[in-house]
Amino acid sequence: MIPEKLLIHYGAHNKLYKKNDFIFQQEHRAHFYYQIVSGEVKMNNLRENGKEFIQSFFSAPQSFGEPPLFAEITYPANAVATQDSEILCLGKERFLKLLLENPEIHLEVTTAIASRLYYKAIMASEISSQEPEHCILRILDYLKEDVYKLTEPFSFKVDLTRQQIADLTGLRVETIIRATKSLEKKNEIQIKNRKIYR
């Protein structure tokens, strides 16, 4: 995303988060632009019954949580470090100044947000109407191609548990287990040492 030197030039500071720390919480106001230097962050919602729904995962050098920053609304989800993480934080006013003074960066940020919104719209439609195998492949292909930029067959090692895939798709863990076994038989994925490769 945005070059680290440019963020620091505009006043960004590094902040360290331990695994399971909240970066921000649902319903809080947005005050910072966040970009990952190292580690991983998930966006999630916790339902009344305690069940977690994972919206997405982010890793370096991705940013996250921008829409509420632009729209001046509260966060619709939590951001939680899934491992020890280093994150650059830039205050809202300085972030907007950076964008105004660097239109090419503004376009990159806008493109990234548009891509995420497109993915969410597609997934919302597909998860409600498609078969579990199809939903799983869509999630894995999004992570492989759009997040990690991999293209070779079975080059993407999925560092998600079956539970996390279930949380991402809204499916039951038992359904994920059955569907991944079926996908392996169809040679859509490989499973080695209990890890999925796409």
Image: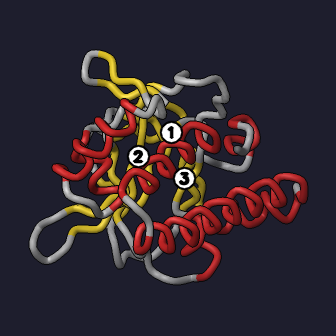
Q: Which mark is residue 31?
A: none
**Image position, residue 157 (x, y; %):** 44, 25
Of the residues tagged 3 and 2, which is closer to the observer?
A: 2
Tell whether label 2 touches label 3 (CB within 8 Å). yes
Question: As rendered, which of 31 and 149 lies closer to the eye?
Answer: 149
Dot 1 or dot 2, earlier in sequence: 2
Q: How many C-alpha atoms fall within 10 Å of the one at disc 2: few (<14), some, or many (≥20)?
A: many
Horizontal relation, residue 65 to residue 71: left or right: left
Residue position marked by numbered label 1 in the rendering? 59
Q: Amino acid at mark 3?
A: Tyr
Query: Mark 2: which amino acid?
Result: Val
Q: Which residue is mark 2?
A: 41
**The one of 99 and 79 positioned closer to us in this rendering:** 79
Contact check, label 1 and label 2, Cβ < 8 Å: yes
In the picture of the structure, the residue carrying the numbered disc 3 is 34
Q: Secondary structure at mark 1?
A: strand
